Image: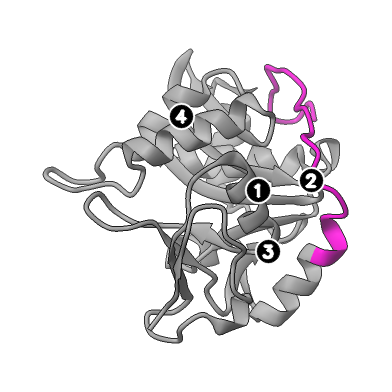
Amino acid sequence: MIPWLPAGSDFPPPEHALDDPNGLLAAGNDLSAATLVRAYRLGIFPWYEDGQPILWWSPNPRCVFRPGDFHISRRLLRHLRGADLSFHLDDDFAGTLDACAAPREPGGGTWITTAMRTAYLRLHALGHAHCLTVRQDGELAGGIYGIHLGGVFFGESMFSTRTNGSKSALAMLWALAPRLGIQLLDAQVENPHLMRLGAYLMPRADFQRELDRLIVETAPRPWPKGPFYWGEV
């Protein structure tokens, strides 16, 4: 059993999360900006679908990247160097959310509910949520969005509308990481795609220690404007 949290409640310790399903910690609470910032600061994130209560997760182990770990294949590097790509920060956060929320297959659902969309738009307006998008030949090709607290970027979702769209966005995010002050990227849960790109699994206890080290304060950090081009950063 997991606890039900009234709105505005403190979260239970992440180590109280279930093993099955991996990381399920609590239900309830709310999606206010203060609650979300507090949750991410603790390594906790919301993930649920329409018709469910808000569910909060802290999986063990955690899928993460560090700068320098990102693996750029020769094929991706040729694409980054040879295609007509431009990269943009925070140019269309709402559009990035909507692209990430689009079903991956006909009839599929999405975890980015209307309430979640509203909550992350609020976080973006407050300077905590950011996006990076890539355009190829002037058309939107892919992107990523997430929460930036201290030295940690909590990646929430990526999308591609053209081949290598999300990979290119992630590659540029890591190229810009020093400028943005990012020392750790949280990818939450492993999948083969992320592992091939250089992600690795970090025990929850180690992840919590990294959050304590890298998030000294949670004040918003503005991102520079683009466009940026591969090889110029």
Disc 2 or 3, which lies upstream in sequence?
3
Q: Nearer the viewer, residue 177 or 43?
A: 43
Residue bearing mark 2: 218
Is residue 163 at all visible to an observer of this figure?
no
Q: In the shown orientation, is residue 30 left or right of residue 68?
A: left
- Tell me which numbered mark, 3 or 4, is placed earlier along the sequence: 3
Residue type for callout 3: Leu
The residue carrying mark 3 is 42
Q: Which residue is mark 1?
A: 37
What's the CA distance linking mark 1 and mark 3?
9 Å
Which of the marked residues, 1 or 4, is nearer the chain's N terminus?
1
Image: 186 above or below 135: below
User: Mark 2 and mark 3: span between their CA atoms?
Assistant: 12 Å
Q: Are marks 1 and 3 in contact (CB under 8 Å)?
A: no
Residue 55 falls in image quadrant = bottom left
Query: Dot 2, how many residues are within 10 Å of its Cα: few (below 14), some (14-19), or many (20+)?
Result: some
Q: Main secondary structure of the magenta part?
A: loop
- The kind of residue tagged 1 is Val
Quadrant, the C terminus: top right
Q: Secondary structure at mark 1?
A: helix
The range drawn in magenta is: 212-233
Q: Quadrant of the N terminus?
A: bottom left
The residue under label 4 is 96
Q: CA distance from mark 1 to mark 2?
A: 8 Å
Contact flag, marks 2 and 3 (Cβ < 8 Å): no
Residue 222 drawn in magenta:
yes
Q: Earlier in the sequence, mark 4 or mark 2?
A: 4
Q: Position of residue 11 (x, y in %)?
A: 59, 67
